[in-house]
Every structure is written in structure tokens, then in C-alpha cells.
Image (spheres, grey):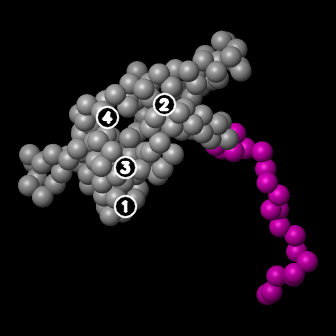
Amino acid sequence: MVKSLDEKTDTAPIAHVGWSLFRASEHWQNAFRREMVKAGYAWFAEARANVIPHLDRAGTRQALLATRMELSKQAVQQFVDGLVADGVVKRTPDPGDARGRIVRFTREGLAVLAAANRVKRRIEVDFEARLGKTKFKQLCEVLADLNASFGEPADE
């Protein structure tokens, strides 16, 4: 049986929570990138900045970064190479695997994290001003509950 060309399918976009979450996240990420670039970290506008949230403060095996980021080892290698060139991270031998490397923040990388925390606080102040204290607190609680339902650890 052949479908009729005139048969209509429901392809109109629908309002859904995913779209709202995506748009709110985009607003937050764009503000964060813009402020980090203004703070002197131009590489935050580049894809390699996406390594930072996947890198544990004590360091992370480079192979694990590829898994966490769902990218090829080669792509992560290039991103890390760029961050090494900028002095943000360094590679050290993995004591548990002679072939492996641990990616760690440098002193400059830790300074970047401190600057990022200041920027994040300013963005939160802006979001709270837009929503009001009560709604902003509720938003944070609801998002924490949602993330906990997926097994995410509580935010510190």
C-alpha cells in the first residue's frame, strides 16, 4: 500500500519543556561565553572551552574526557592541545597506565575557574532580577530535583 501524497502529518512544532530548557540554557551559555571573552579568555568562544566542565578539579584521564564529551579521542586531543598551548591545562603521566595521560589545570587554569565563578554569580544575579527571588529559588530547586531524578549529585 502506498501512502497518499495528500496525507497530512503533524509536523508543526509543539510547545514542550525541552525547548524552554534549551532556550534558557542558550541564554545562560551565551551570556557566560560573552563575559568570559570580555574577561580576557577569548578561547571561551571556541569549541575547546567545552572540555572545562568535563575536567575534574583533581585532573581527568584524557580518554575519560573523550567518553564524557562523547567525542573521538582525536577531537579531544586537539581541544586539549589548544588548552595546553594557552597554559590552561597540562598533561601528566597516568600512574595507573603508562600509556595514559591525566589532564590537569595549571595555576592559570585555576585562575580561569575563579574568573568563571565570578561570571556565573553575575549571571545568576541577572536571572534572579528577571524572575524575582522567589521564582528564581523555585527554579533552582525544581532543576535540582529534576537532575537528582537522573542520579545527578546535588550541586554544591
- Camera-near label (3 vs 1) is 1
Q: How many marks?
A: 4
C-alpha separation, residue under disc 4 versus residue under disc 2: 14 Å
Q: Which residue is labeled 3 in the image?
A: 68
Which segment is the magenta one? 1-22
Percent x, y of residue 132: 70, 14
Percent x, y of residue 59: 24, 39
Q: Quadrant of the C terminus?
A: top left
Percent x, y of residue 118: 47, 22
Amino acid type, residue under disc 3 in the picture: Arg
C-alpha separation, residue under disc 1 versus residue under disc 4: 20 Å
Q: Which residue is labeled 4 in the image?
A: 109
Does residue 155 appear in this view? Answer: no
Amino acid type, residue under disc 2 in the picture: Ala
Q: Earlier in the sequence, mark 2 or mark 1?
A: 2
C-alpha separation, residue under disc 3 versus residue under disc 2: 27 Å
Label annotation for residue 64: none
The reply to whether dot 1 and dot 4 touch (C-beta < 8 Å) is no
Q: Earlier in the sequence, mark 3 or mark 2?
A: 2
Q: Secondary structure at mark 1?
A: helix
The reply to whether dot 2 and dot 1 touch (C-beta < 8 Å) is no
Amino acid type, residue under disc 4 in the picture: Gly
- Camera-near label (4 vs 2) is 2
Residue 3 in magenta stretch: yes
Task: Count residues near mark 4 (Cα–Cα under 10 Å), then give few for <14, some for 14-19, many for 20+.
Answer: some
Task: Count residues near mark 3 (Cα–Cα under 10 Å), then give few for <14, some for 14-19, many for 20+.
Answer: few
In the drawing, does residue 91 fall left or right of residue 70? Answer: left
